[in-house]
Image (cartoon, rainbow, N blue to C red):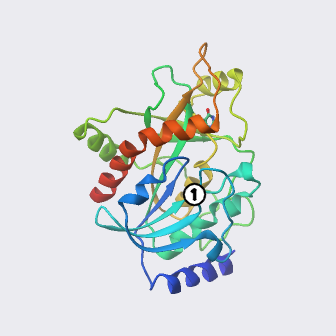
Amino acid sequence: MLEQIDFTTKSIREKTNNFIPEIGIILGTGLGGLVKEIIVEYVLPYESIPNFPVSTVEGHSGKLIFGSLGGKNVMAMQGRFHFYEGYDMHQITFPVRVMKALGVKTLCVSNASGGMNPKFEVGEIMIITDHINLFPTNPLIGKNINELGPRFLDMSGAYSNEYINLALEVAKENNIKVSTGVYAGLTGPCFETPAEYRYLWRTGADAVGMSTVPEVIVARHGGMNVFGISIVTDLGVEGSVVTVSHEEVQHIAKMQEPKMSLIMKELIARI
Ligand code: HPA
C-alpha cells in the first residue's frame, strides 16, 4: 500500500505543479456545489489518477479539485466511493491516505442522511459530533503500517470539538438553523426499515447514512483533524417513517447545499 500511495502522490504532484493542500474536502450526494466556491487551480478526473477507483453512483461525478477556499489551499473530492458499490474499505479510503501524503492536515466531510431524532425536520443540517461504525468491517483491518498510523487507534474526540464550536458560531452568525448529533454509518444500499430506524435511534444514533465512517477512521489514523456535516434528507422517526428515494435525497440535499457550503467555507477560513 505504501508504494501505491507514493506512486499516486507523485503523479498528482506532477499534474498539479507540486500544489500542497492543507485541507481535504469530501462532498456527499447532492452536495458538490461547494466546488463553485473554490478558486480552482487544477482538476483531475478520477480516471486520470493512478490507483484511484472510479465512482459509479448517479449524482456523484468523480473529480479531484485543487484550489483555494476561504484563503486556504484545499483539495476536494467531488464524488466519493461507497461500500455498496462493491469497493473494499482500502479502496474507499485510499484517497484519504493520498490526501495525507500530499500534506492535508484537516478533513472536512459532508453527506446526506436519514434522521431518527424526532426533533429533526427534513433538511435539518446536523453537525456530526460522533459516529457509530455499523459497517461489517473496518478500514484498519489487516497488517498495520506503522508509518501511516497506530495499530490501535483512539477514537475519542474523532470529530474536533474546536471545529464543532466554530461551525456552531458560523451558523449562528448567519442565522442558519443547525443541530448536532451522532451519525451511524452502514452499508446500504437499502434505506432502512422502520424497525432498523427505531433500532438505530434507540442505540444512540441521530442520523444514518452509507458513507463517511471509513474515511473518518482513516483520517484519524493519519492524525488529521476532522469536521463532518450531514444534511438530513428524510426522516425515519418512529411512528412516521415515510418512503424515501435517491432522487428525493438528492433534491433535499441540493436545496440545503448552499447553507452547508457557507458553513464549510467560513469554517475553513477560520481554521
Ligand atoms: N438511510 C441511509 N442513508 C441515507 C438516508 C437514509 O434514510 N437518507 C440519505 N442517505
Residue in the foreground of this view, choosing between 8 and 105: 8
Residue 260, percent from left and from top: 39, 45
Q: Is residue 66 left or right of residue 6?
A: left
Residue under numbered circle 1: 79
Residue 95, located in which quarter of the rendered image? bottom right
Residue 158 screen position, x and y as percent:
49, 49
Whether residue 127 is visible to the viewer of this picture, yes or no, is: no
Other residues around mark 1 within 10 Å, as few (<14) / some (14–19) / many (≥20)? many
Q: What residue is drawn where x is 44% and y is 36%?
A: 126
- Using the image as rendered, state which of residue 46 and residue 13 is in the foreground: 46
Q: Tell me what residue is drawn at x 71 percent, y 40 percent.
A: 188
The percent coordinates of residue 26 (x first, y second) are 51, 57
Q: Is residue 46 visible?
A: yes
Q: What residue lies at 75% left-to-right and 45% top-to-bottom?
A: 136
Image quarter for ligand 1: top right
> In the rendered view of the protein, which quadrant contains the C terminus?
bottom left
Q: Count the marks: how many? A: 1
User: Under tag 1, what secondary structure?
Assistant: loop
The answer to whether 225 appears left or right of 175 in the picture is: right
Identify the residue shown where x is 52% and y is 83%: 15
Disc 1 Cβ-to-ligand 1 distance below 8 Å: no
The furthest residue to the left: 173
Considering only vertical position in the picture, is 179 above or below 85? above
Q: Quadrant of the N terminus?
A: bottom right
User: Would you say 157 lies left or right of 62 here?
Assistant: left
Q: Amino acid at mark 1?
A: Gly
- Measured from the top left, where is residue 59 in percent x and y? 59, 50
